[in-house]
């Protein structure tokens, strides 16, 4: 059984996917972390991601990205170095979104994602899982929420970490990222025709998890 959960940044995909995977005893794979690892590597090397697709293509030929699923979650390794927490910044998120428009980046990461999912029960989240990575997934959910609701969640998260931020800037970044992710020519963010839409704007995280669980249980009954 493969569960594909797609949707824009901040819709609660990772929290919902993690909770669902834990309840079902499935492996959770966060594909955004892979794009973030590429974005982080490019930032570290000072590559102008938007304008130097040639350098990004070279980077993809030489980069080593590894993922380990542990009881504490998914760990990401870049050329052997654990980058799990370094990739969680807004700047890396934006770099990931810029890198994600490049064909060579997507080809390599999609191959890795399919390899990781091969023969396993997985919950995989991203932008193109139901449309491209696992088009035959038994269950597909498209999770979304308004820009303001997503911005507020991110704002609360950053405030709780003691980071200085403004709701206005966060919402603007979300809009830029949405536009980037949904307007790219290769595998843009969009709902697969057979994905169930779950709008979490007015739901708490607990309610979102319960709603996703209900969708999956219905699917399980069908197969
Ligand atoms: O889910 P996230 O915010 O960690 O993802 C970071 C960026 O990676 C996102 O803006 C778009 C890109 N991405 C993608 O293009 N395809 C995926 N399957 C996952 C993420």
Image (spheres, grey):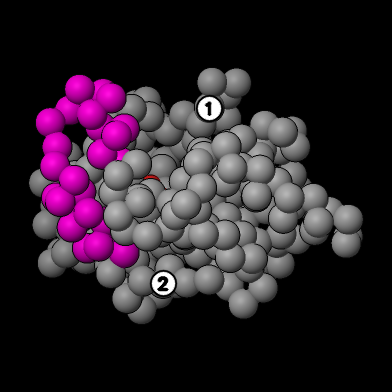
Q: Of marks 2 and 1, which one's residue comes earlier in the chain?
A: 1
Label 1 crowd bin: few (<14), some (14–19), many (20+), radius 10 Å: some
The picture places residue 109, in percent across and down from the top left corner, at 46, 54
| Dot label at residue 189 | none
Q: Position of residue 147 (x, y in %)?
A: 32, 58
Disc 1 secondary structure class? strand
Which image quarter: residue 133?
bottom right
Task: Determine the secondary structure under disc 2.
Answer: loop
**Magenta span: chief secondary structure:** helix
Residue nearest the observer in this picture, 167 or 120? 167
Circle 2 packing at 10 Å, graded few (<14), some (14-19), many (20+), is some
Q: Residue at x 20, y 22 (%)?
A: 162
Label annotation for residue 73: 1
Q: Which residue is mark 2?
A: 188
Tell me the quarter of the picture where residue 182 sits: bottom left
Q: Is residue 170 magenta?
A: yes
Residue 30 colored magenta? no
Quadrant containing ligand 1 reads: bottom left
Q: Residue 200 in the image: state x and y as whole percent.
A: 50, 53
| Position above or below: 12 against 129 | above
Q: In the image, which residues are magenta?
A: 154-178
At 57% from the left and 55% from the top, the residue drawn is 5
Image position of 140 (left or right of 42): right
- Report the front residue among 126 and 206: 206
| Residue 21: image location, x then y, percent | 66, 38
| Residue 166 seen by the camera | yes
């Amino acid at each position: 059984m493969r569960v594909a959960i797609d949707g824009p940044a901040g819709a609660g995909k990772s929290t919902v996917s993690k909770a669902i995977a834990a309840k079902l005893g499935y492996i959770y794979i966060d594909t955004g972390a892979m794009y973030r690892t590429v974005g982080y590597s490019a930032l570290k090397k000072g590559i102008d991601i938007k304008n130097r697709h040639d350098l990004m293509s070279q980077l993809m030929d030489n980069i080593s990205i590894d993922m380990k699923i542990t009881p504490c979650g998914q760990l990401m390794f870049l050329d052997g170095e654990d980058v799990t927490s370094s990739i969680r910044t807004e700047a890396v998120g934006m770099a990931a979104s810029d890198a994600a428009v490049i064909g060579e980046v997507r080809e390599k990461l999609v191959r890795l994602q399919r390899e990781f999912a091969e023969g396993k029960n997985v919950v995989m989240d991203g932008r193109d899982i139901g449309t491209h990575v696992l088009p035959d997934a038994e269950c597909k959910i498209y999770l979304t929420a308004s820009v303001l609701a997503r911005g507020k969640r991110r704002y609360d998260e950053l405030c709780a970490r003691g980071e200085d931020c403004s709701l206005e800037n966060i919402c603007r970044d979300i809009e830029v990222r949405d536009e980037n992710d949904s307007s790219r020519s290769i595998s843009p963010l969009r709902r697969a025709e057979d994905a169930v839409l779950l709008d979490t704007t007015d739901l708490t995280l607990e309610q979102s998890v319960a709603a996703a669980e209900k969708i999956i249980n219905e699917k399980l009954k069908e197969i």
